[in-house]
Amino acid sequence: MAIIGLILLVLVAVFALENRSPVTVLFLGWRYDTVLSYAMIAPLLIGAFILYVAGLFRQRELRAQVRDAELRLREAERQRSAPFGSPAQSAGEPSQPSR
């Protein structure tokens, strides 16, 4: 993974060095004079950061779902291993007759 990151870093550096012509960026009434490569790389980095943060929130949500599923599984296993007719038995199942 580090090799891929290093290759991407070199490609971005080459891109920045080859695209140094000045441009004017207009956005929502703001006017900003910058280099072409910066004007193209900045939105890319901002978008990558937004996707990263969204991924963190999604990962947190999925971990909560996994915890809930594991809890339900442990409860089902506990009920299954409980002796027949014990208080841990669910309400819909008949109990053994006492003799």
Image (tube, helix red, strand yellow):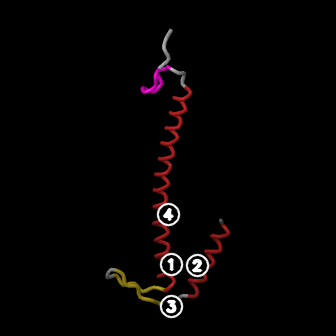
Whole-Å distance between the Cαs marked 4 and 2?
A: 19 Å
The image shows residue 35 at horizontal and vertical percentages of 48, 86
Q: Residues within 10 Å of mark 4 (few under 14, many from 20)?
A: few
Q: Look at the image and give the residue range highlighted in magenta.
A: 85-94
Does the CB distance between marks 4 and 2 fall below 8 Å?
no
Q: In the figure, is residue 94 to the left or right of 31?
A: right
Which residue corresponds to mark 1? Answer: 41
* Quarter containing the N terminus: bottom right
Q: Could you tell which of marks 3 and 1 lies nearer the N-terminus?
A: 3
Amino acid type assigned to the residue bearing label 4 in the image: Tyr
Q: Is residue 34 above or below residue 57?
A: below
The image shows residue 52 at horizontal and vertical percentages of 49, 63
Q: In the figure, is residue 9 to the left or right of 67?
A: right
Residue at left offset 50%, top offset 54%: 59
Magenta stretch secondary structure, dominant: loop
Does the CB distance between marks 1 and 4 fall below 8 Å?
no
